[in-house]
Image (cartoon, grey):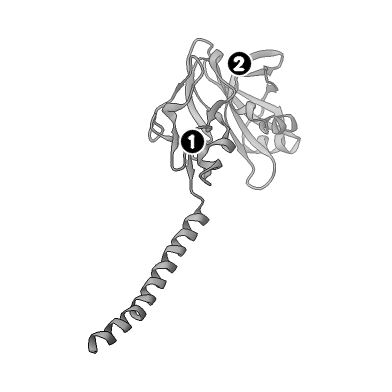
Amino acid sequence: MTIEINATPRKAQGTGASRRLRNSGRTPGIVYGSGDAVMIELDHNELYHKLRSEAFHASVLTLNLDGKKESVLLRDFVMHPFRQQVQHIDFQRVDANKKMHIRVPLHFLNADIAPGVKTGGGKISHVMNELDIICLPADLPAFIEVDLGKLELGHSVHVAELKLPKGVEAAAHGTHTAEAVVATVQVPRGAVEAEAEAEAAAAASAAAAAPAAAAPAAKEAKK
């Protein structure tokens, strides 16, 4: 499915011009990449609703700029600190023959049937919700599936174990490596605390019982 967003060139620039633009229901932005950077403006309501779609953040978009269409990626956007208002947005042009670096969402499957959850009483912890990938625009997936169906209690799924689509590779940088943890099954914190409390109570009970058991033995020794 192609996602299209409409824009027009933005002539006036500067803080005052951008403020007036926002007050009129428009959002300032920029398109950069191969070729010249172009200042643009977009309808705020259309943009705001598209930003609520997961696919808008991880798809090659079609930017319709005054009737001329080009492929772009959403690179950044700025929200107002407390209003539901998009203050600025950045798009980057896409070269069909050049690999790109982008984050795509992870979709977790079969968590309810994972042995660590179903029989072990554990809880799934999502360490990552997105994955940095490198691929050509034509190979860009809308999301990547993470199958948790065989995950045991205390075990994890790592980046290296993910089944990536053809032409897609995980981008390794910093702590984001093949051994990085994507999700794990942990014993719920409440259960750990309850077990610790039970062990402490048992130890206290045993300690209290020890003097009582030693008293009759001491009396027998005096005889």
Q: Residue at x 69, y 29 (%)?
A: 50
Residue furthest toward the front? Answer: 223
Image quarter for residue 206? bottom left
x and y, in percent, of residue 141 in the image: 56, 20
x and y, in percent, of residue 91 in the image: 58, 25
Report the number of discs.
2
Q: In the depicted view, which residue is nearer to us: 3 or 141?
A: 141
| Left or right relative to 96: residue 210 | left
Q: Which residue is mark 1?
A: 151
Determine whether label 2 and label 1 are within 8 Å by CB.
no
Estimate how packed mark 1 is, as few (under 14), some (14 to 19) or many (20 or more) residues with alpha carbons within 10 Å. Answer: many
Image quarter for residue 117? top right
x and y, in percent, of residue 189 in the image: 50, 54
- Secondary structure of the residue carrying tag 1 is loop
Q: Residue at x 71, y 16 (%)?
A: 66
Q: Which residue is mark 2?
A: 71
Type of the residue with mark 1: Leu
Image quarter for residue 213? bottom left
| Left or right relative to 38: residue 202 | left
Residue 137 visible in this rendered orientation of the protein:
yes
- Secondary structure of the residue carrying tag 2 is strand
Q: Residue at x 51, y 55 (%)?
A: 191
Q: In the depicted view, which residue is nearer to us: 170 or 17?
A: 170
